[in-house]
Amino acid sequence: MILSDKRILEEMQQGTIKIEPYDRDCLGSNSYDVHLGKVLAKYKDEMLDAKKHNQIEYFEIPEEGFVLLPNMFYLGVTAEYTETHAHVPFLEGKSSTGRLGIDIHATAGKGDVGFCGNWTLEISVKQPVRVYAGMPVGQLIYFPVEGEIEIKYNQKKNAKYSGQPNRPVESMMWKNTF
């Protein structure tokens, strides 16, 4: 079951869902549109190592936009800060974004109950495309959780992505033991 627009509004009033900035025009019948933040990032090294802390370099999208290139991997961020305390948030690309050949996440479309922060986007494109800060890129949908949550994500001591800032966050795979 997915929350409807009325239920999303009710949950926002109760404080279980938070979206900042919030714009009523971005609320669809069962989703909320999120926008591309002004900061992008790329990994510094061409080859990444899952056991290494791979460094990224940040850059701002200029007013005239930035051209994303195929065979490149970019990290972006949502302009919106969100908190979800009683539901599972899913981030999906908008159909208009997909029709431009832009993928906004490789694998991490699902959040956890208790996620608080801006969403890091895993961006790749099929052909060159110019993007702009503030353009709609995705939509959040919310699923109710059955059963009681023992420990929310923002309460876990090993939560690697809790409190994500308004800029992309690199992979923290290197913090895992394997």
Image (cartoon, rainbow, N blue to C red):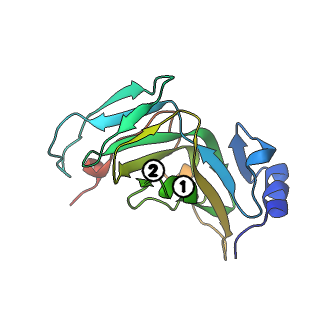
Q: Which residue ends up furthest to the top in the rendered image?
A: 63
Q: Residue at x 51, y 30 (%)?
A: 38
Tell me the CA gap for discs 2 and 1: 6 Å
Could you tell me which secondary element the residue under label 2 belongs to? Answer: loop
SS at circle 1: helix
- For badge 1, the amino acid type reads Tyr
What x and y, as percent, mark residue 44? Answer: 22, 33
Residue 14 horizontal/vertical position (percent): 83, 53
**Residue 137 placement, left or right of 174:** right
Q: Nearer the viewer, residue 11 or 33?
A: 33
Q: Is residue 146 visible?
A: yes
* Relative depth, front residue between 35 and 54: 35
Look at 58% across and 39% down and name the residue there.
135
Quarter of the picture holding the N terminus:
bottom right
In this picture, residue 161 sits left or right of residue 15 = left
x and y, in percent, of residue 78 in the image: 55, 41
Looking at the image, residue 165 lies above or below residue 109: above
Q: x and y percent of residue 32 in the render?
A: 69, 53
Residue 160 in view in this figure: no
The crowding category of the residue bearing disc 1, from other C-alpha atoms within 10 Å (few below 14, some 14 to 19, many at least 20), is many
Mark 2 near mark 1, Cβ–Cβ under 8 Å?
yes
Picture residue at 38% right of the left edge, 58% below the top? 106
**Residue for badge 1:** 153
Instruction: Give the quarter of the image for residue 30.
Output: bottom right
Residue indicated by mark 2: 159
Q: What label does residue 57 carry, if any?
A: none
Q: Farthest residue toward the left?
A: 47
Identify the residue at image location x=44%, y=40%. Answer: 76
Query: Which label's residue is closer to the chain start, 2 or 1?
Result: 1
